[in-house]
Image (tube, grey):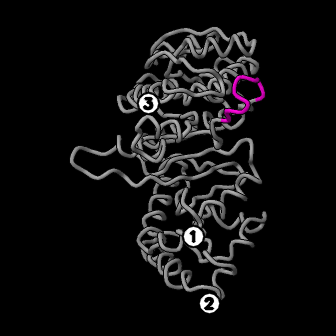
């Protein structure tokens, strides 16, 4: 891999907001006027990336939005040199036949082909990290997609021959707060039955390992939310916190991981409390995503931990209702690109010397 390799961006559902924010992110790089920073990922620039997908879909969206974005079909090896003047695209998959905001059957085929091409670049060492634009699960399911979403598909592809897929962990990261939900897209009524000591211990191990390996935080501090109000009030408001969360935290401590909890979730997210941990581990989706999106709605990043490669994604969906209108905000995608570059650079440095900690403000 050359000294500076471009990130690879999967286009996502081409009927959604993915093409809009991709084009807008490239224009933000041009506005920065810093070709060197754009290539290497300086703090003010958008790092160089190559899009895997249908070039015609991107060109049509640029025309619709009235954006002057030259496109160049190229490979990762040529992408950085082009990035100052044109958006690099690696053609992948069939032509998109739908319209913005109205996905059709071609959307799913485009999404999967883009993902396959993008992941292929990362696993072949031709790109240091994968960034994914959003897909629509309903569209993918109608086409026979057998996975709940991006993350499970990536974990399946990451499995070594004859071995189980790795356990992926979703983290929402921003400069203000990093959170991990132990259970994700499940009804709240099912959460207590899904929580186990083993699940929380495995989640904690993965978070601690990847925060050290990729974020450079040597001994990350993990704070576990209680499931129930007031972390169960010593069992008077539900027994799960004493029966499941506390034993998991104690097990992690015995392994040398800096874990605390169960803690009352309603007092974990003010500034003084956040200063006492690096990652908050919640028991269910909204418990930790509400504070994360309140603090960083436009620039939060979805990071997948537990995979053998770096994957980030904007923390929003396909936004079909505003696709093709020019109202899409590229901030979360830009944050995902910047974080992917930071993690890739830190991982590369780790192979030569200990990487410095990536401090959050």
* Residue 120 rendering spot, x and y as whole percentages: 38, 28
Which of label 1 and label 3 is nearer to you? 1
Q: How crowded is the residue under tag 2: few (<14 C-alpha within 10 Å), some, or many (20+)?
A: few
Instruction: Tell me which label, 1 or 3, sits earlier in the chain.
Output: 3
Instruction: Tell me which label, 2 or 1, sits earlier in the chain.
Output: 1
Residue positioned most to the left? 162
Q: Considering the numbered disc 3 on the image, is that residue within a helix, a strand or a loop?
A: helix
Which residue is under mark 1? 189
What residue range appears in magenta? 319-327
* Residue 202 rendering spot, x and y as whole percentages: 42, 65
Residue at left offset 47%, top offset 37%: 142
Instruction: Tell me which label, 2 or 3, sits earlier in the chain.
Output: 3
Q: Foreground residue, 54 or 358?
A: 54
Q: Foreground residue, 102 or 116?
A: 102
* Residue 285 rendering spot, x and y as whole percentages: 61, 60
Which of label 2 and label 1 is nearer to you? 1
Measured in 3D between alpha carbons, the distance from the residue under mark 2 to the one under mark 1, in whole angstroms, is 22 Å
Which numbered disc covers residue 74?
Answer: none
Is residue 320 highlighted in magenta?
yes
Which residue is under mark 2? 234
Q: Foreground residue, 156 or 3?
A: 156
Label 2–label 1 contact, CB within 8 A: no
Q: How crowded is the residue under tag 3: few (<14 C-alpha within 10 Å), some, or many (20+)?
A: many
Residue at left offset 78%, top offset 65%: 270
Q: Considering the numbered disc 1 on the image, is that residue within a helix, a strand or a loop?
A: helix
Is residue 247 highlighted in magenta?
no
Which residue is under mark 3? 112
Asked whether residue 5 is in view, the answer is no
Name above or below for residue 12 compared with residue 79: below
């Amino acid at each position: 891999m050359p000294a500076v390799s471009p990130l690879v961006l999967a286009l996502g559902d081409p009927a959604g907001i993915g093409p809009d924010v991709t084009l807008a992110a490239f224009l933000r790089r041009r506005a920065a006027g810093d070709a060197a920073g754009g290539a290497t990922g300086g703090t003010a620039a958008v790092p160089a990336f190559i899009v895997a997908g249908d070039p015609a879909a991107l060109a049509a969206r640029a025309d619709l939005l009235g954006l002057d974005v030259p496109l160049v079909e190229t490979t990762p090896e040529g992408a950085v040199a082009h990035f100052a003047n044109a958006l690099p695209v690696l053609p992948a998959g069939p032509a998109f036949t739908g319209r913005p905001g109205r996905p059709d059957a071609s959307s799913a085929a485009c999404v999967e082909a883009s993902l396959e091409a993008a992941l292929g670049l990362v696993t072949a060492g031709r790109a240091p990290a994968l960034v994914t634009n959003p897909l629509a699960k309903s569209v993918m399911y109608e086409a026979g997609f057998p996975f709940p979403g991006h993350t499970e598909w990536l974990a399946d592809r990451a499995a070594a021959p004859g071995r189980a897929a790795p356990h992926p962990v979703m983290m929402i990261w921003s400069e203000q707060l990093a959170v991990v939900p132990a259970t994700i897209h499940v009804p709240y009524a099912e959460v207590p039955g899904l929580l186990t000591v083993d699940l929380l211990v495995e989640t904690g191990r993965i978070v601690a390992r990847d925060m050290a390996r990729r974020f450079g935080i040597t001994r990350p501090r993990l704070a576990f939310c209680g499931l129930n109000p007031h972390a169960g009030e010593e069992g008077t408001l539900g027994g799960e916190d004493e029966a499941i969360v506390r034993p998991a935290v104690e097990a992690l401590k015995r392994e040398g991981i800096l874990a605390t909890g169960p803690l009352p979730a309603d007092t974990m997210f003010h500034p003084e409390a956040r200063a006492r941990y690096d990652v908050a581990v919640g028991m269910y989706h909204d418990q930790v995503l509400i504070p994360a999106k309140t603090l960083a709605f436009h620039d939060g990043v979805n990071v997948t931990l537990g995979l053998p490669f770096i994957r980030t994604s904007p923390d929003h969906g396909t936004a079909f209702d505003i696709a093709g209108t020019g109202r899409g905000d590229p901030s979360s995608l830009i944050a995902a690109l910047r974080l992917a570059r930071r993690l890739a650079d830190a991982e590369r440095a780790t192979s030569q010397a200990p990487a410095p900690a990536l401090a959050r403000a």
